[in-house]
Amino acid sequence: MSNSLSRINLNQEVLLFRNEAFYDLVEEHCGSTVLEIIQAQDISSVDCLLDVRNIFTFLELDSNELIPLKKKAGIVLNDGSFIIKKGIMYKVDVFTRSLYRLNEQHLIDSFQHFNSNGSTGLIIPEILVQKFPFLLTLMNYSNFIINSKIDFTFFNIMMNNIIKNATMDERGYRYDNIIRQFASSLYILGGRAAYEFVCLNIPAFIPSTQVIQASIISSQHYLTEGLFDFLRVRDYFSSKQSTLAFCAEDSTTIVLKITYDSTSNMFIGFSLPLDQNGLPIPSLYSTDSFSQLENWYLNESMAKLLVANLIQPLSYSSGNLSPYLLAAYGTDNTFKATDVISRWRCIYHRCKANGIRLIGFSTDCDSRYLNAMKLSLGFFGDFIYDGHPDNFKIDVPSSWNWFLMRNKQLFICMQDPMHICTKLRNRLLSKTATLVLGDQIINLKPLYYVIDNFSKLDHGLVQSDVNPKDRQNYGSCEKISNDKVLKLLDNISNSFGISIYLQVIKNIRLAYIEKTTNVIDRIFHAWVVVFIFRCWSMWINSMDRQTLDLFVAQHSNSNFTPTENKNKTKRDFFITYQSHFSVEINAHSLVYLAVLFSEGQISAESLTIYLQNSQTCENTFRSARSISSTCSGGVNFTVFQFLSRIKKLSMLQSIKNNVGENKLRFPQHHKQSKISRNNVTQQNTISFSKHDIEKKVNDAYQYVIKLMSPLNLHQWLRNQQTLSIKQLSANISQQFQRSWTKELNANKNDDSDTESDSETSDTMADDASSNHDTDEDLDFDNGVDSIYNVTTSVHRGVRLVNDVKQEHAEKYFRVTLNNQIKFLHKQTACWLLEKDKSSLPADRLSRVQEN
């Protein structure tokens, strides 16, 4: 039907209709059934009707009281669903569209009349102006916004919403969708106290605290512990128009606590066992038996760490590249490298089935993850994906004797560069390791000299930057390796060794962390680090242990004697094996991606190296800690609290992703990069060839040879001649192969998989494995459990009741207490079985400091 026929001729007077006049108008144009629906919702004016928008949503409620009304307005199907009659829908649609058009025309006419001939055409009583002086300001404001370049969209919606609500009873308040998004953001960012402060001081502006809490709880951003939700990942990537991804995995220490989740009827906080795919088994800890829960408390491991897997879209087409939380779950940290391999294989194939091509994985430097990377890449280890149909394949030139990675890979791996930097810093601060490079002992003395003898304006350092107890401080890595510090070290005696060491950290930052570094320069910086460590490693291995001990004794101010550290190995004079191998893996993976791009096998989006790390996990953990209430001192979380906070973060991120539509503006933290996205795109889309890659690697080698020449390392190398890049690479290849053989032999005798890096300070859980007993040992008494040794009969504040409604029955245990049947709430049961209260320091840095 044409628009001219689908319209009712009404005059603007009807916009003021209320109560009986309004009801007569509705009955005349829509019929008595529609009138009943409107009256049932207490809609008594045209304004209220226009604000409600859809009057039929009310009928979707599952209530017996609505059944008679549903039968009048539509048809109730056998499966319980409900369909509204087409004729009624048509009448209401025509009626409401006519009112909308009439209202829009009224606003236009009023505005034109307001501005005609420079006169308002409107007389405001003096008494009204005295009571509400902002009305004069509002009149001037309406003239100002016509020519203003400032976007007042949200402000206009806010004022309109407040004034509309102020004219009606509080129970009839309605809120625009944008106002609801603003309210949700305010509650998430500011907490309950800040939200209630705004509610009390700006009436009719935002929904009540209870309403907004219910809105967040009922949102679609629900995360089930241990569930890898690939369908939502697919939808998210479709919305971003992206098909390339990078997966990150990391863990953080949590508060040990079991919590009952009434939404899923699950007990959250136990360590979830892994299946054959390396994935946690979700929905495992659910029971209606108090005895079963008690048995779990006695025999099952509690989660000490929370593991998060995030998927990062790699795309330039979208203005927002936020990672997606694929899964989160608690663990007791007893998993093995084989579990990681199985999990990554499963994630890859499940992503592929949903149209997403994973090009790599990133983690921290845990030895289990490192072993998983070795096997996944076949990098001095068995290649587990040999013959896989999805393998990439590159043509490696014969002259690339420095490139030690296989030419076929299913995906690449990246050790988190920030973790590498902090591990190198920790090695420098270590009290057990003595780093020796040529005729230099690498220690903190030159840095202390800089702090004590130069102005802070010249270097920006403080004592905490070289504090050995502070183990996870990437900020200090940036500070001690900046150009100002390196320049000052040039003029300090016996500082050449630490200067080279700090340049390593600087080059890692430029290669993998800085956004504006182009890919070809990233290769140069990455391989500068590789060749420094290869030269250093070969020199260390060419020296005998006694010579190194004697050198340290002669150049140390302490009363060091070679016999004091007879249990040390030559590895104690070098960086950790994990750090060295991580540097090699990252540099080879970077070159592999660059070659794939040069051969046209992947797009430029795959070269967003600064996104290919596990900092997405760390950022998620930090965000979850930051959204605790302003009046709360608790920044740490349990597994359940993390899942709850993630729901809020997901909702907030969804709102941020729609800022183009909702016109909301969010503050940007001063530490967030303000670098133009176009600039980053341009840096990563420059064209290059394999010849350019080879030239950059050779340039890096020549740079390192020149850099290290003052150390006179060639005196201990082959025939007192500096080795060629081919000889150096062949030597390091043999070293890695020997290390891998030793690991294989060790694994045959020891099945455990724990962190072997002595410089790692991450909290590690006990190695006790979970013992999953069967139910055969439990003694049930017709589904009723008994609680013994209870002497009091009054339980104030404890959810222990005599009866519960059927709809809440699953939230309670049926127990016998003093020979009486009682119903014990499942969260109260957790409190009852809790023997100790676990906590973590409020300052997270104190958890990663040495005692």
Image (tube, rainbow, N blue to C red):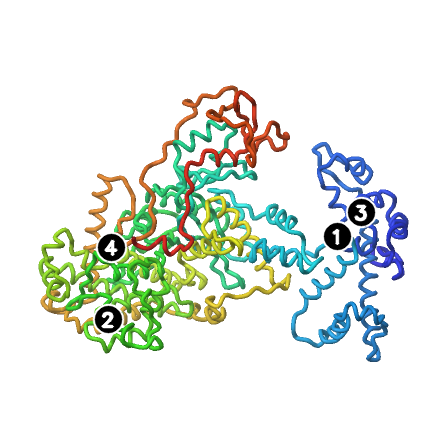
Report how far apart the C-alphas of labels 4 and 3 lie in the structure.
73 Å
Between tags 1 and 2, which lies in front?
1
Q: Residue at horizontal 87%, vertical 62%?
A: 12
Residue linked to disc 2: 446
Mark 2 crowd level (few <14, some 14–19, many ≥20, 10 Å Cα): many
Check disc 4 and give the amino acid type: Tyr
Q: Answer yes or no: is residue 622 visible.
A: yes
Specify the quadrant that holds the N terminus. Answer: bottom right
Residue linked to disc 4: 577
Check disc 2 and give the amino acid type: Pro
Is the residue under label 4 in contact with that under label 1 (CB below 8 Å)? no
Q: Position of residue 343 (x, y in %)?
A: 40, 44
Residue 7 picture quarter: bottom right
SS type, badge 1: helix
Q: Where is residue 221 in the image (x, y as percent from the top left)?
A: 56, 48
Q: Position of residue 594 (x, y in %)?
A: 37, 63
Q: Residue at horizontal 29%, vertical 48%?
A: 755
Indicate which disc, 4 or 2, sits on the residue closer to the N terminus: 2
Indicate which disc, 1 or 4, sits on the residue closer to the N terminus: 1
Q: Which disc, if any, is residue 42?
A: 3
SS type, badge 4: helix
Q: Residue at horizontal 36%, vertical 69%?
A: 520
Between tags 1 and 4, which lies in front?
1
In screen coordinates, is 268 left or right of 175?
A: left
Q: Where is residue 421 in the image (x, y as percent from the top left)?
A: 32, 61
